[in-house]
Image (cartoon, rainbow, N blue to C red):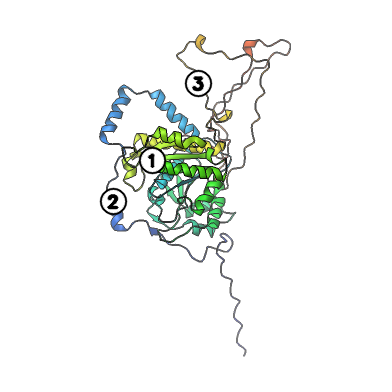
């Protein structure tokens, strides 16, 4: 009898076809970021402000504070951070040298965006050479990296499929590490483009912790993102080197400098450079210059806990995030927002009616601006519901047979706040 024919062999699942041929052949394992002896023996985190400063701030808040001014500053920053976006905004964070605080600033931006915005926020580590972004965001172990995720990304994947490969951090954001702590891991341009292009439609704000300049991935991130943050130490040599980098960035494309924010980081309580002179020296090309003060909690390293940050550090992080989001949305370098994004100014309640400026009469009522149709939301993310606030009051119409009185002319309605849920990303309120 002839031997029976063997059944045909099934083809092995090809890697890189998630949902079609199965998972890739190599599935990474979880790797702890710190050895057990170091993870268990970490000291207690310190507060950013010392006890004397906290006591003085409490006394000033009781006896000599201005709640209205503090509320206005927080509201203005929150308004800028929560402004709606039509598509995912990617922000590149880089520096000219190691140790400038690049990963710390990227973590602060990701935490601030995740705190103020209600839509998905992503932090990507594009610096695989033993970066500290996972440490700063409180991760304990790393499994999937950017290179591993690029092999299984598929256009049909939803955000619920992607979050299984990401690490959550406090505030509701997600983290994509760059490596598993191995020396020599590299991130090529093709992998970076695949990851950033595939994830952009799922996240409203993406903060990219890039390599130091002039690395290849960092140069690519500078020209492909909507805004860029350049971190430099607040020292004379750091400011001088940053001026050269800004000149180089302006030579790449004239539209890059107006969407660039320079962050001066202080590694000690005593600053080595005048912040005003440094801002005047670095902001000549349209870039914004903002300081990040010294904070004991940030200087100690480890995971960043927002409740332990100093009051000035939280305010500075909110200002930096607001400035970055403004420039990422406008993309024209102007700090003045479009008319439909200006927050409505309520009239003063204590001033008499006669002291308020009367609106100038117009010859005919202005036509209301057309409202755009809502764009489809990102895949896998719930669509926003209809607004639940009170409807706008109806505008009076002049009588067809009589001339309108100059005092009864119609005026444009105040703009809608940025939390209009008709936007595909929504906006949100501070948590």
Q: Farthest residue in the bottom direction?
A: 1
Q: Image quadrant for the C terminus?
A: top left
- Left/right placement of residue 112 relative to residue 271 reads right
- Left/right placement of residue 90 relative to residue 302 reads right
The answer to whether residue 137 is above or below residue 334 is: below
Closer to us: mark 3 or mark 1? Answer: 1
Residue 344 picture location, percent across and down:
53, 24
- Left/right placement of residue 365 relative to residue 189 reads right
Q: Mark 1 points at which residue?
A: 236
306 or 294: nearer the viewer: 294
Q: Is mark 3 on a helix, strand or loop?
A: loop
Q: Which quadrant holds residue 333?
A: top right
The answer to whether residue 175 is above or below residue 344 is: below
Q: Mark 3 points at which residue?
A: 346
- Left/right placement of residue 25 relative to residue 236 reads right
Res 428 visible: no
Residue 79 picture location, percent across and down:
49, 32
The answer to whether residue 230 is above or below residue 416 is: below
Label 3 and label 1: CA atoms lie apart by 44 Å
Label count reads 3
Mark drawn on residue 125: none
Q: What element carries label 2?
A: loop
Q: Earlier in the sequence, mark 3 or mark 2?
A: 2
Label 2 and label 1: CA atoms lie apart by 34 Å
Q: Mark 2 points at which residue?
A: 42
Res 85 visible: yes
Residue 241 picture location, percent across and down:
43, 44
Q: Is mark 1 on a helix, strand or loop?
A: helix
């Amino acid at each position: 009898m002839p031997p029976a024919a063997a059944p045909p062999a099934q083809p092995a699942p090809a890697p890189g076809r998630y949902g079609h041929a199965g998972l890739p052949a190599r599935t990474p394992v979880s790797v702890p970021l710190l050895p057990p002896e170091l993870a268990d023996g970490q000291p207690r985190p310190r507060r950013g402000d010392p006890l004397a400063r906290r006591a003085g701030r409490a006394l000033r808040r009781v006896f000599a504070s201005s709640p209205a001014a503090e509320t206005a500053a927080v509201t203005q920053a929150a308004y800028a951070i929560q402004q709606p976006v039509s598509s995912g905004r990617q922000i590149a964070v880089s520096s000219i040298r190691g140790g400038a605080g690049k990963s710390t600033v990227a973590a602060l931006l990701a935490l601030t965006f995740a705190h103020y915005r209600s839509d998905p926020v992503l932090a990507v580590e594009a610096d695989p050479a033993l970066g500290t972004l996972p440490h700063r965001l409180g991760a304990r172990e790393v499994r999937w990296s950017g290179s591993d995720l690029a092999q299984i990304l598929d256009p049909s994947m939803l955000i619920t499929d992607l979050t299984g490969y990401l690490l959550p951090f406090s505030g509701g954001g997600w983290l994509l590490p760059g490596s598993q702590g191995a020396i020599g891991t590299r991130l090529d341009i093709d992998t970076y483009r695949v990851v950033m292009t595939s994830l952009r439609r799922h996240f409203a704000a993406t903060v990219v912790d890039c390599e130091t300049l002039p690395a290849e991935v960092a140069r690519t991130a500078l020209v492909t993102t909507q805004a860029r943050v350049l971190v430099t130490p607040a020292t004379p040599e750091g400011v001088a080197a940053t001026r050269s980098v800004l000149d180089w960035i302006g030579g790449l494309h004239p539209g890059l400098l107006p969407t660039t924010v320079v962050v001066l980081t202080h590694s000690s309580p005593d600053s080595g450079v005048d912040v005003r002179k440094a801002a005047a020296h670095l902001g000549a090309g349209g870039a914004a210059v903002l300081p990040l003060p010294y904070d004991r909690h940030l200087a100690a390293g480890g995971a960043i806990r927002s409740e332990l940050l100093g009051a000035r550090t939280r305010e500075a992080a909110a200002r930096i995030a607001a400035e970055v989001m403004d420039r990422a949305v406008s993309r024209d370098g102007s700090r003045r927002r479009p008319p439909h994004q200006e927050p409505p100014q309520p009239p003063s309640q204590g001033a008499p009616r006669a002291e308020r400026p009367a609106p100038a009469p117009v010859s005919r009522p202005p036509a209301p601006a057309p409202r755009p149709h809502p764009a489809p939301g990102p895949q896998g993310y719930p669509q926003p519901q209809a607004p639940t606030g009170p409807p706008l009051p109806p505008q009076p119409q002049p009588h067809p047979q009589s001339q309108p009185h100059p005092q009864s002319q119609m005026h444009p309605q105040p703009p809608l706040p940025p939390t209009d849920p008709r936007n595909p990303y929504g906006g949100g309120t501070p948590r």
